[in-house]
Image (cartoon, grey):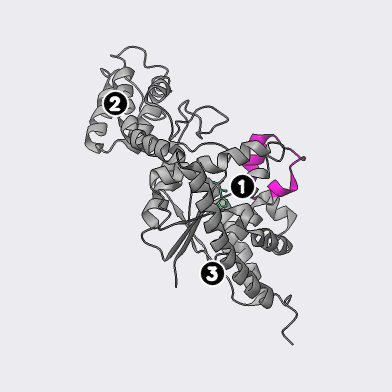
Amino acid sequence: MKKILLTGDRPTGRLHLGHLVGSIQNRIKLQDEVDEAYYMVADAQALTDNAENPSKVADNVIEVILDNLACGVDPQKTTFFIQSQIPEIAEMTVFFLNLVTLARLKRNPTVKSEMKEKGFGENVPAGFLTYPVSQAADILFTRANVVPVGEDQLPVIEQTNELARKFNSIYGNFFNEVEPVIANISRLVGTDGNAKASKSLGNAIYLSDEDEVIEQKVMAMYTDPNHLKISDPGKVQGNVVFTYLDAFDMNKTEIEKLKTQYEKGGLGDVAIKTRLVKVLQNIIGPIRERRKELEKNKLKIMQDVLQSSQKVRSIATLNMMEMKKVMKIDYLGF
Ligand code: TRP
């Protein structure tokens, strides 16, 4: 079976280290291993909870593209496109909505926690509640079966598979099972120790942050509030500096040594933070500089993405025709 990869980001802000380890690294690795790869800017999905902020979404479309390109998602290997340029996704969503119940949508753990985070209560936009259905369409319209995502997206992929199975049970075998690909570090804590790094919490280190900003953010990181003097024994568990060192410092033996020393006492926060600053500057520096270069060609990049979106559209048109045929809504099959 052909391996088709599809992945994407909501354009609601610049991407940060959590995105890098959670999905971008897998995109870069997998684009060499699959038969086809697609990267989608999920602008329509971003609008499901940003209807009143159209500029926020519009302005961040190019930003997430630049972030991915700067990290090494390669347009020669991965076809970039913009969700709203593919009307078939919206069309497919309408049909899929008949295959899922409201109760099931309300039970989706990802949507549930996001609704809580955003404080929607009963006044959730219908488009937001149903975004997993539209995400199933994002994935299935290309017949993709490999989907690298962060851990928080697993319930959405599960719902995609439910929809595919339901569709197949009515109309015959049409869609393949989708396989989520989860990173080793699928969720990066925020610099403040909060479970999730995010723009709204102001606790994320961005792939476009300057060296001074990286330093400031690391120096302000949450460590062990009871580790006051260098000689005090310190906690490694829940210590954000060590969590980040585990994620980004390649020298694992050295990190184990530092952990032992920190737990015993005799290793200060400034020492471990200084190490982390260097590690992160070395990772982000080249990405940020490549990003600056790419930024000079913003217009050309956008033109290219709109053009490759048209290519994706032609695939969508064909797949939609086939889907309508099996759904008995092509009306020519006498
Ligand atoms: N929901 C994803 C996120 O917030 C973005 C996304 C939209 C996506 N459609 C997708 C990811 C399809 C993978 C496949 O990160």
Task: Tell me which amino acid carries mark 3.
Answer: Asn
**Residue at coordinates 39% horizontally, 57% vertically from top-left?**
30
Relative depth, front residue between 303 and 328: 303
Relative depth, front residue between 264 and 256: 256
Task: Tell me which amino acid carries mark 2.
Answer: Arg
Label 2: few (<14), some (14–19) or many (≥20) C-alpha neighbours in 10 Å: some
Query: Magenta region, mostly helix, strand or loop?
Result: helix
Could you tell me which quadrant the N terminus lies in? Answer: bottom left
Residue under pointer 1:
43
SS for callout 1: helix
**Residue at coordinates 68% horizontally, 60% vertically from top-left?**
93
Task: Tell me which amino acid carries mark 1.
Answer: Asp
Could you tell me which quadrant the C terminus lies in? Answer: bottom right
Q: CA distance from mark 1 to mark 3?
A: 25 Å
Residue under pointer 2:
275
Label 1: few (<14), some (14–19) or many (≥20) C-alpha neighbours in 10 Å: many
Q: Is 6 left, or right, of 159 in this rendering?
A: left
Residue under pointer 3:
176
